[in-house]
């Protein structure tokens, strides 16, 4: 469940980011027509942080769902302090562009900081394959969606863990 949550949040965040980046001129023209150039740049800078924001939420939820509440909280507090110092510095140095850049960087700091603990925890966890038929159906769907018609998907259980390989 946790891995699927992280994958879906990353894909959704990337899609949102792309739409936000591409629609920046239209949004800026509707919301701030007198500051068009600055608004487009600010929206586009901020759009780069959207996938990071989605991943940070997914990583935090995944750690909390697997009983790692303290790890998620510690990293969140640490990232808040780093973010505060970064925001103050960037706003003083670059104004509104600095604020957008600090927002973007803050949302990438959290998944980068939570990534190693989450990877360690998921590598220690065991995911037994109890019902192979539904799992094979889901994996077949995943192959068609993510891999396309030319991809080959191999799945099996090794040492009580599900192993999935997607070849292109």
Image (cartoon, helix red, strand yellow):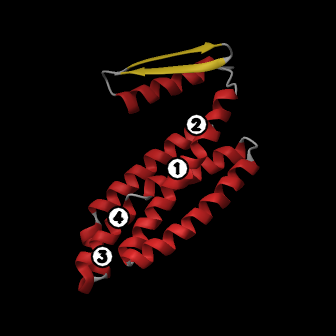
- x, y (%) of residue 63? 68, 45
Residue corresponding to mark 3: 39
- Does dot 2 land on a helix, a strand or a loop? helix
- Does dot 4 land on a helix, a strand or a loop? helix
Residue drawn 60% across the image and 20% down it: 162
Q: In this view, does 119 lie to the left or right of 21?
A: right
Quick check: marks 2 and 3 in contact, CB under 8 Å? no
- x, y (%) of residue 117? 64, 40
Residue corresponding to mark 4: 45
Q: Is residue 126 left or right of residue 44?
A: right
- x, y (%) of residue 107? 50, 58
Q: Nearer the viewer, residue 5 or 131?
A: 5
- Circle 2 or circle 1, nearest the eye: 1
Number of other residues with Cα within 10 Å of mark 3, as a class: few under 14, some 14 to 19, many 20 or more: many
Of callouts 4 and 1, the N-terminal one: 4
Number of other residues with Cα within 10 Å of mark 4, as a class: few under 14, some 14 to 19, many 20 or more: many
Between the residue at mark 4 and the residue at mark 1, the CA separation in whole angstroms equals 18 Å
Residue drawn 61% across the image and 64% down it: 80
Between the residue at mark 2 and the residue at mark 1, the CA separation in whole angstroms equals 11 Å
Of callouts 2 and 4, the N-terminal one: 2
Between the residue at mark 3 and the residue at mark 4, the CA separation in whole angstroms equals 10 Å
Number of other residues with Cα within 10 Å of mark 1, as a class: few under 14, some 14 to 19, many 20 or more: many
Residue 3 disc label:
2
- x, y (%) of residue 91? 44, 76
Between the residue at mark 2 and the residue at mark 3, the CA separation in whole angstroms equals 36 Å
Of callouts 2 and 1, the N-terminal one: 2
Residue corresponding to mark 1: 55
Quarter occupied by the N terminus: top right
Residue drawn 57% across the image and 63% down it: 82
């Amino acid at each position: 469940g946790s891995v699927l949550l992280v994958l879906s949040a990353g894909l959704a965040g990337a899609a949102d980011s792309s739409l936000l980046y591409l629609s920046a001129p239209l949004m800026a023209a509707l919301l701030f027509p007198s500051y068009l150039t600055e608004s487009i740049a600010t929206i586009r800078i901020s759009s780069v942080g959207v996938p990071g924001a989605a991943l940070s939420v997914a990583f935090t939820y995944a750690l909390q769902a697997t009983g790692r509440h303290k790890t998620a909280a510690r990293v969140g507090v640490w990232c808040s302090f780093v973010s505060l110092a970064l925001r103050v510095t960037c706003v003083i140095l670059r104004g509104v562009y600095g604020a957008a850049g600090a927002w973007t960087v803050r949302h990438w700091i959290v998944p980068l900081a939570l990534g190693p603990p989450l990877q360690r925890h998921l590598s220690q966890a065991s995911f037994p394959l109890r019902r192979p038929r539904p799992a094979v159906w889901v994996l077949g769907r995943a192959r068609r969606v993510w891999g396309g018609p030319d991809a080959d998907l191999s799945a099996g259980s090794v040492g009580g863990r599900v192993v999935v390989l997607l070849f292109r």
